[in-house]
Amino acid sequence: MTQEELFKNLIAHTKEYGFIFPSSDIYDGLSAVYDYGQMGSELKNNIKKYWWDAMVRLNENIVGIDSCIFMHPKIWKASGHVDAFNDPLIDNKDSKKRYRADVLLEDYIAKIEGKIEKEVEKGRKKFGEAFDEAQFRATNPNVLRESKKAEDVRVKMNEALNANDLAALRQLIIDCEIVDPISGTRNWTDVRQFNLMFSTQMGNTSDETGTLYLRPETAQGIFVNFLNVQKSGRMKIPFGIAQIGKAFRNEIVARQFIFRMREFEQMEMQFFVRPGEEMKWFKTWKEKRLAWHLAIGLGKENYRFHDHEKLAHYANAATDIEFNFPFGFKELEGIHSRTDYDLRRHQEFSGRKIQYFDTELNASYTPYDIETSIGVDRMVLAVLSSAYKQEKLENGEERVVMKFHPALAPVKAAVLPLVKKEELTNVAQSIMKELSCDFNCQYEEKDTIGRRYRRQDAIGTPYCITVDFDTLTDGKVTLRDRDTMAQERVDIKELPEIVNKKVSMKRLLEQL
Ligand code: GAP
């Protein structure tokens, strides 16, 4: 099965089992907007809790806030979003479709890279055991030619983007002979800048003064509360402010399921430091954030850092933590050294002095900022796509199982009376009542036990607890492990401790 087919199956699975639904589904959906169902919202909440506890609870010098989506419109002028939060867009005159110019070029580069990988595979097959991949890549004329072609396009694209040279960007699309995937023609318009912020009106004024923007990042809510938090919390540099919240972007290229949405959620942390110490903290936060990802066990090989060549207008260093999604390595989290740009700009635009008095240095300064920013939905997608497994069992049957880390699994345990008989259901319900105080559990009495196991596998429940007739005499139940499918008899009294040991978030936090 190809990665593409696997991804399609995953999307269908998430709908069938209540993880993710297209928004406004009965009206045929709304492009790039998705709702989380009963399983998805549990999973998402667990991810958010893991992030919040890792940031706010494990770091004495980080506090959390919850600022509003609506903010004073001047904030977006100060932050640079009104003038510089744009995507370069190009239209095809025949299909009337609109594309991001840089994405057309990135897709073109990806195609060349695909050709290179095919060439390497051919070499591997031809030379068998004796194949030396590094030497092949360094010497094969086809690989060298294609690599140079890709690199040339990448360099030219970055130069054009950095210089905001839209004509050069268009010329590159023409020179690469990129065709519209729908019309198949090269009949392109000029490239234009398109602002990604959604706007709305506040109150009853329809003129510009009432225009508000839906925030495109949660970060600004932190910057404008810097003084409030620092003073009320008597925070000392270095310290951080974290928040989780919705953000909105009018993305033109909205695709790949919940990877790029128009309404999404971010988990952002701004860490304020002394000027000149930002690179040390940038390195620290790169390491800390990677450790957070690795603890959930999606595999070290599925992460890589991608340092930015093109820096955002506010940054003096930036890297992405990329994850190996079903459609390849893509940005999961951004870590930016944002200098003192944001606080300085808000000082300028608000007229309020935003400075910190450092008692150790006996000096005032505008703190520098290191930002860690991860999309909740992208994290959900990373977890879902790694967890999704189609397995062939020894008896020839197949099962689909979501192998979530138990701390993130939406349902922690399912309580199942073997048959629907009152003496069994009474015991099962009392176990359910006891466990539900600590864990999200499901009670199921319909269908054969085998079918119920499959349903729990499909939503990734780590433990199934079966009550049978022996339970009535020995006070024990059958505990089935999702991953190994091994079953063991355990005492009912031991259940809370056994389940807790497996699913506790502590197991993750201890590794940080
Ligand atoms: N405050 C900095 C900032 O917003 P960003 O790289 O634009 O930086 C940070 O976004 C993270 O937010 C990304 O790494 C990604 O995980 C998530 N994100 C950004 N745009 C998104 C979108 N349209 N849909 C889903 N997640 C998105």
Image: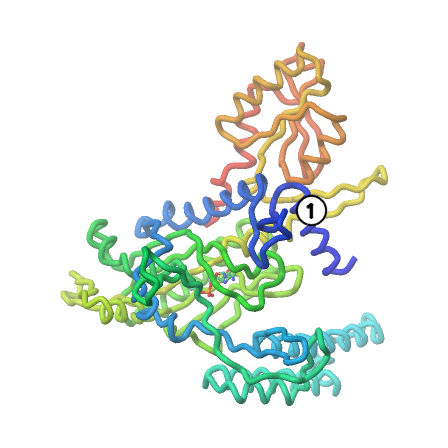
Where does residue 425 sit, x and y in percent of width and height? 65, 16
Q: Is residue 65 above or below residue 128?
A: above
Q: Which residue is mark 1?
A: 13
Where does residue 161 sit, x and y in percent of width and height? 49, 82
Residue lying farthest left?
362
Disc 1 secondary structure class: helix
* Res 312 quadrant in image: bottom left
Residue at (31% x, 68% y) in the render: 342
Q: Amino acid at mark 1?
A: His
Quick one: 31 or 439, which is closer to the camera? 31
Quick one: 462 or 90, which is closer to the camera? 90
Q: Is mark 1 within 8 Å of ligand 1?
A: no
Residue 23 appears anywhere in the view: yes
Residue at (51% x, 80% y) in the render: 192
Where does residue 259 sit, x and y in percent of width and height? 57, 59
* Res 132 quadrant in image: bottom right
Where does residue 42 sit, x and y in percent of width and height? 54, 40
Q: Is residue 149 above or below residue 271?
A: below
Quick one: 445 or 140, which is closer to the camera? 445
Q: Is residue 217 above or below residue 95?
A: above
Residue at (73% x, 43% y) in the render: 400
CA neighbours of label 1 inside 10 A, class few (<14), some (14 to 19), many (20+): some
> So how many labels did they put on this image?
1
Residue 301 appears anywhere in the view: no
Is residue 274 shown left or right of residue 373? Answer: left
* Res 459 quadrant in image: top right
Color scheme of the displayed model: rainbow
Q: Is residue 228 above or below residue 466?
A: below
- Position of the N terminus by quadrant: bottom right
Residue at (53% x, 54% y) in the render: 377
Is residue 108 shown left or right of residue 127? Answer: left
